[in-house]
Amino acid sequence: METLSDEIIHCILDSLDEGHQVSPKYMGPQHFLRITMHLDKDDTQKNTRNPFYNCSLVSHRIRRIALPFLFRALGIIVEAVTFPDDGEEITQFKTILARNADLARLVRHVQIIHSPKRKGYNVHKNYQFIAMVLAAFLELKCMQLCSVTGDTFKLDSQIPVIQAVNQHPSTDLCIVYPQLPRQPDGHLPSISLSRVVCFWHDSNSQHTQILVQELGLRILHIQFTHTDWHLTTYPAIISITRCDFDSEPKSDDGIGSIEMFCDFLDRHPSLRSLSLGKGFLQDRAPWNAALLNDLKPHTCVLHDTSANLTPLNHGGTQTSHWQLIRVTLGSLEVDPSLGVANLMAKLGAALPQVTNLSFENPRLGQEFNPYLFWNLSTKDIAALLGSNFPKVKTLHLSDTVFDNIVQEWSSEDENPHYEYLTHPASRNNFSDIQKSCETFLWNLGSSMPSLDCVSFRIWPNFVHRWQTHPNIGIDVHAYIVRRQSGTGNMSQQDIEVVVTSPASTNMARAHQLLRARRGRLPVAMPFT
């Protein structure tokens, strides 16, 4: 890098300065410089993944160029170091700010993070930290109080903080709380909340509308559980989740037409994501109505859906439109004159961006459609799904394929006939057909290039659920793990199927995958 000009190095660093994927304005960049109250040792280990920190260590020249990027966003971890008393930690923080006073003009975003090692939340001490941050960083744009959640957040206790923010000389400054308290204070604060942003809120509170409409509170993500959710306008809203509240759609949800739904969208130009649960009449959303129309003459019932506002280049003009990314189909009926291949082609064309697809009857204990893929081999089913849903990462097939698997297994030599297998008096185990299930899952992974997680339902004892107890279906869950081997023309993709339930032949591998997925770590293929 030393041979590059200052301008080129600046451009390289600028390309690394990506904003937060959800809300860069309020959540800041992706890379924060983490600092604690240590004076005698640095916080290198906390910043090894920060590209600007690593660049600043290359040379004095590159450090000078990297400093504006490095100090643009600070993550201040309080109570991470043991002090005899609160006063000493506050004094230590003052010393750190004084040592770096010449860099204060660079700071735009600050996170104040409470150390997980300490329990409880000292309102008075944390207010002093906040006051020092506000006094030191005069060009601050956003301050996130990452630890003020749940019982620690009372509106009355935050009034001094909000007053200090309102009086700050930076007109762009806002303060971001993770969420509002579920149980609001007895009375609402008589103070402007126009600089206060709440990242997430469950709006099932009578005070929410007052906080938003009268006091100016901004909420980024809202979860609704009541029926008049669409009546209020929420400035700055990014995503909305309309939660389930009943097993059946309700006509009194309030949105009686597509026009009313579009009016809600028009009032929220910043909205980028919308999830509609099973208590909502799905055809009120224009993109859902379009999906149902595109599938005709086949019939479909939507259970719940999620859509994102997606950029679109239309004839050189940048526009945007809503696209479904998650769909749960409550029922799906094939028009016999066209067949299931035509239905899947229509469904795939209508859902080009869907990443999560589920076939699931919302009625507890009811089958979806065990004969959806009637007379198709499991290999043909995998090919049909793969050709129409190349971007699907998570797939749930409910009870649509188990009958096909059992029929194929029973047709093999030395295996019992299908009629015997499905008789209520027969005794069968999942282990009998586990290899056939894994073969089907491997074919799915080979046909669907993005598939990561797949599940389908089996009937206990191989008997249709309506012949036994209706609520004892078992889901087969599996992960699809991929690895490229070879290079150039000899390159190929190796696929591993790991069944995690109801039984696994390699529980150690299953647990490794579960831990990796929860921690969002890359998954290594086992050595062979």
Image: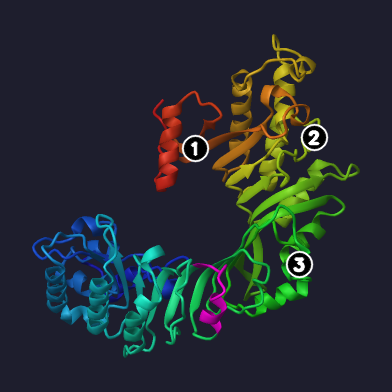
Kindly identify the amino acid type of the residue bearing the numbered disc 2: Tyr
- The magenta stretch spans which residues? 201-213
Q: Is residue 173 left or right of residue 303?
A: left
Where does the C terminus fall, quadrant-wise?
Answer: top left
Depth check, mark 1 against mark 2: the one in front is 2
x and y percentages locating residue 307 in the rendered image? 63, 62
Q: Is residue 279 left or right of residue 165?
A: right
Q: CA distance from mark 1 to mark 2?
A: 29 Å
User: Residue 265 occupies which quadrant of the picture?
Assistant: bottom right
> What is the number of the mark on residue 53?
none
Secondary structure under the numbered disc 1 in the rendered image: strand
x and y percentages locating residue 152 in the rendered image? 36, 66
> What is the number of the mark on residue 481?
1
The residue at which mark 2 appears reads as 371
Q: CA distance from mark 1 to mark 3?
A: 45 Å
Label pair 1/3, CB-CB below 8 angstroms? no
Depth check, mark 1 against mark 3: the one in front is 3
Residue 68 shows in the view = yes
Residue found at x 61% / y 37%: 455
Secondary structure under the numbered disc 2 in the rendered image: loop
Secondary structure under the numbered disc 3 in the rendered image: helix
Residue found at x 54% / y 42%: 452
